[in-house]
Image (tube, rainbow, N blue to C red):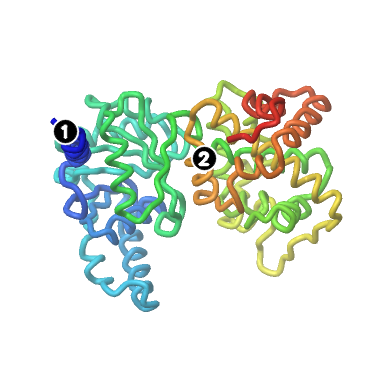
Amino acid sequence: MCSITKEIIDRDFIKALRLSVFAVKSNNMIIGIIGSGAMGAGIAQVAAMAGHKVVVYDNNTAALDKAKNSLTATLQKLQEKRKIANAAEIIGRFSFANDVAAFAGCGLVIEAIVEKLEIKKAVFTEVEKVVSADCVLASNTSSLSITSIAAACKNPSRVIGLHFFNPAPVMALVEIIPAIQTKSTLVPAAVDLMKEWGKTPVIAKDTPGFIVNRVARPFYGEAIRIYEEGIADMATIDWAMTEIGGFRMGPFTLMDYIGHDVNYVVTETVFQSFFYDPRYKPSFSQKRLLEAGWLGRKSGKGFYNYAEGSTLPEPNKDMVLGTEIFERILAMLINEAADALYLNIASANDLEIAMTKGVNYPKGLLQWCNEWGPDKCLEKLDNLYHLYHEDRYRASALLRKQAMGNKKIV
C-alpha cells in the first residue's frame, strides 16, 4: 500500500472514530442542559443557535419558566437588532423539563449547576440511568475535578469537562478537560463540536482551576494583598491595571462584577485543591464581603458601593506607584502561566488563547514575558520572595531556567 493511500485511510479512520463518539454528529444531535440559571441558559442558547434541539432541565419550575422567558426575549431582541433572522425557529428548538427522563434521546448532556462536587456527582449518577450508552456527559465546572465527577458514573469514559465562560453566547473560549478515565477519541470530537458551535476550544489537564481560573488567581489575590498592606487603595490599583497595564477592568471592579459568591469560592476551591499552596491563599477581605452578603454589583455593594447616588473613589494617579503595582501583579501572572506550561497543564498556544479569549487580557502572558524578558520577571519575583520569605512568591523552575540561560520563555 502506498504511503498516500495509507494516509487517506488513516485520516478517514480517525474521522470515523471522532464521529462515533457522539450518538449523532452536528446539528442533528439533541443537547441536554442540566440547570436553567444564567450559565445553563447561555449554553442552551449557543447550542440552539448552532442548530440543535435542546432539552433544558431544572427541578425548579419557576427557574425553568424564567429561563424560557429570558431566552425568548433575548432571541427576539437579537432578531430586532438584525443579528439573527430566525428567532422563532431557534426558540422552537427548546424544550423545558423537570424530569431527567427527558434526556433519553440526547447525544450530549452538559451540567451547569452549583459548584458542589457531591451534588454534581449525584446528578451525573441519576442522568446516566436514563441516557443511551453512547451519550456523552459533560460538566461546566470551573474548578472541580472532572475525574471525581466521572468516578460517580458506571461508564466514566464518557465524561469530560466543557467549561464555558459567562456569558456563554458572547465569550468565545471553551476549556476542554478530559478526566483520566475519558476515552481518547472524546477530546478531538469535543474540539470539533465546539468549533462547529463557533467557539474557540483549548485543552487543559484536569488540575484545579484548569487554565484560566488557575493562571488568573494572582490578578485578584495579589491586588488584594497590595490593598491589605496599605500600599494603595482599591481605586488606585484598578487604575494602574487598566490605564498602565491595559486590562479592560481592574481587579476590584472585576471581582465585584463576577460576584464574591463566585470569585471567592473559586479561589477557596483552588487553594484547598492544591493542598493549601500559599500561591492561591484566599483573603479575609474578600471572605468578609461574602459573609456580609456584599457580593458586588448583584447586591449593590462589594469592594465598591453601587447604591444610587454613590460615587466611586478617585485613584492616586502617581505613575511610579502605578507602575510598581502593575509590574508586581503582572510578574505574578507571568509566573503562574510559566508554571502551568512547565507542568504541562496546557500547550503554550492554548495558554495564550485561554487568557486572551477567556478573560480578555491585552496579550498572552508568555508573550508578555518574552517582551519583558524572563530575567526582569525573575528579578521582581526574587525581590518579593526575599522581602516576604513566603512561598507565594517562589519563581517557576521554567522561568528561572530561561532567565539563567538568557532565553525566551517559549
Reading the image, the residue beneath label 2 is: 351
Quarter holding the N terminus?
Answer: top left
Q: Horizontal placement of 293 versus 91: left or right?
A: right
The residue type indicated by label 1 comes to Cys
Q: Can residue 276 be seen in this view?
A: yes
- The quadrant in which residue 311 appears is bottom right
Q: Name the residue located 31 percent from the left edge and 36 percent from the top edge.
A: 187
Residue 32 vertical placement versus 314 (above, below): above
- Residue 52 place in picture, x, y as percent: 22, 56
- Could you tell me if the residues under marks 2 and 1 are in contact, i.e. CB atoms within 8 Å? no
Q: Name the residue located 60 percent from the left edge and 40 percent from the top edge.
A: 366
Quarter holding the C terminus?
Answer: top right
Q: Name the residue located 27 percent from the left edge and 26 percent from the top edge.
A: 156
Reading the image, the residue beneath label 1 is: 2
Which sits in the foreground, 97 or 270? 270
Q: Horizontal placement of 225 versus 185: left or right?
A: right
Q: Name the residue located 62 percent from the left edge and 24 percent from the top edge.
A: 277
- Residue 5 place in picture, x, y as percent: 16, 37
Q: Horizontal placement of 258 versus 199: left or right?
A: right
Q: Horizontal placement of 354 versus 112: left or right?
A: right
Q: Which mark is residue 277?
A: none
Which sits in the foreground, 165 or 35? 165
- Residue 179 place in picture, x, y as percent: 36, 28
Q: Earlier in the sequence, mark 2 or mark 1?
A: 1
Foreground tag (2 vs 1): 1
- The quadrant in which residue 74 appears is bottom left
Q: Distance between the residues labelled 2 and 1?
A: 39 Å
